[in-house]
Image (cartoon, rainbow, N blue to C red):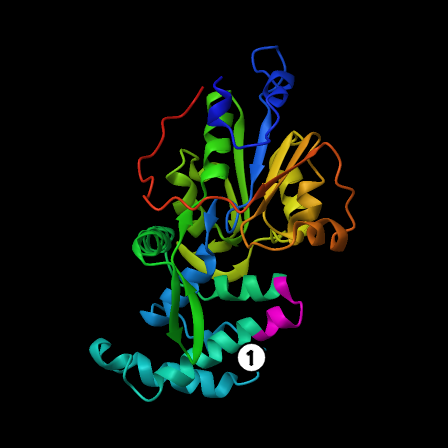
Amino acid sequence: MDPKSLPQHFPNAFFERHASGNGSARPLAVFDCDGTVIQGDIGESMFYRQIEHFAFRVSPADVWYDHPNRVELGRAYSVLATTPESKRRTHAAFDPFARFLLSWYFDQLAEGKITKACADIVQLFAGFTLADVRAFAEATFKEELHAPMGYCRLGGRSLARGARFLRESVDLLHSLQKHGFDILAISGSNKWSVEAVFAHLGVPAEQVIGIDLVVKDNSLSAEPKTPIPIQNGKVEVLRRVDARSPVLVVSDSRNDIPLLLASTDVKVYVNSHRRNTDDFFTLGKIVRDHTWVVFEEPVIIQTNPLVRLPTHG
């Protein structure tokens, strides 16, 4: 292979150690999504877009039973549901409705309830069919790819906007595909949003794991499938879907340290948030040895690679 096609500091010997065709099972590589292969959070983007477009099949008050303002949330939803679409965003009930939803999500994150917060916003897609939610995910990702990287205002908050692929992670994933690796994406965002991202990189939906909902009567229920793929849940779901241990794991987050440590060979930390790399290892209580590779300040791809790659056999 051409070493120039690999990100800087990635060990070329890795591919020699895991060369396919030696009679063993195809090697497995695992990628996170948000902050790892893209700059941005596609799961949160779907949540924001759902609010902006008032794209609900079920009232959030009928899904979030423990919301502290559930009665008020239900009333605001009922008012907006009977308001003409062209007038919803300017209706007096819209801003409180958005605030109720956003505050519940961000307050739980602030309290460290990451798994519940992420599962809660996925539950809001109850009542969608799989076809409808996948179409919504594709439309969201398309919008985020073309939106300027910046912020938008919604529900009294300044929210991140835009998504772009990250050069180092994309180049690494492409090199793995060319060398016969199986790719598995595991994310704490909803599964359909992650499918939309990885489809552009030649990774099919059946190789994507994200928060998902149980289907009942041909539509999504509000019941999340377990285990929820966040923190240790990522390792649990990985072991359920694939008997192989990954030889490479790529992520940007300390939340994924259990998954990173599940790699039997190389672990890649993507410092897409421009944080102090030493803090990642110190706060995560990790010894930074030769098995770790760090992508410092990965390059944002400004031109969007929208061509799906062929499957590499």
Q: Position of residue 40 (x, y in %)?
A: 46, 55
Task: Specify the quadrant of the image occupied by residue 304.
Answer: top left
Q: Tell me, yes or no, if residue 54 can be seen here.
A: no
Q: Nearer the viewer, residue 309 or 129?
A: 309
Q: Position of residue 1 (x, y in %)?
A: 49, 17
Kindly identify the residue that appears in the image at 44 percent across and 73 percent down: 158
Residue 46 percent coordinates (x, y): 41, 60
Q: Is residue 243 part of the magenta span, yes or no?
A: no
Q: Quadrant of residue 241?
A: top right
Q: What is the tally of numbered marks visible in this picture? A: 1
User: Does 109 appear in magenta?
Assistant: yes
User: Considering only vertical position in the picture, is 184 above or below 211?
Assistant: above
- Point 62% across, 37% down: residue: 249
Q: What's the magenta bit mostly, secondary-structure-wise?
A: helix
Residue found at x 71% / y 31%: 264
Left or right for 19, reference 126: right
Pick out the residue farthest to the top: 22
| Figure check: 305 above or below 95 | above
Which residue is identified by label 1? 67
Foreground residue among 196 and 270: 270
Q: Which residues are magenta?
A: 107-114
Is residue 129 or residue 250 the one in the foreground?
Answer: 250
- Residue 194 at x, y = what percent? 45, 48
Q: Residue at x 62, y 23 (%)?
A: 14
Q: Secondary structure at mark 1?
A: loop
Question: Looking at the image, can residue 82 be seen?
Answer: yes
The three-letter amino acid code for the residue at tag 1 is His
Q: Is residue 128 above or below residue 166?
A: below
Crowdedness near tag 1: few (<14), some (14–19) or many (≥20) residues, C-alpha within 10 Å: some
Quadrant of image for the C terminus = top left
Q: Is residue 147 above or below residue 207?
A: below
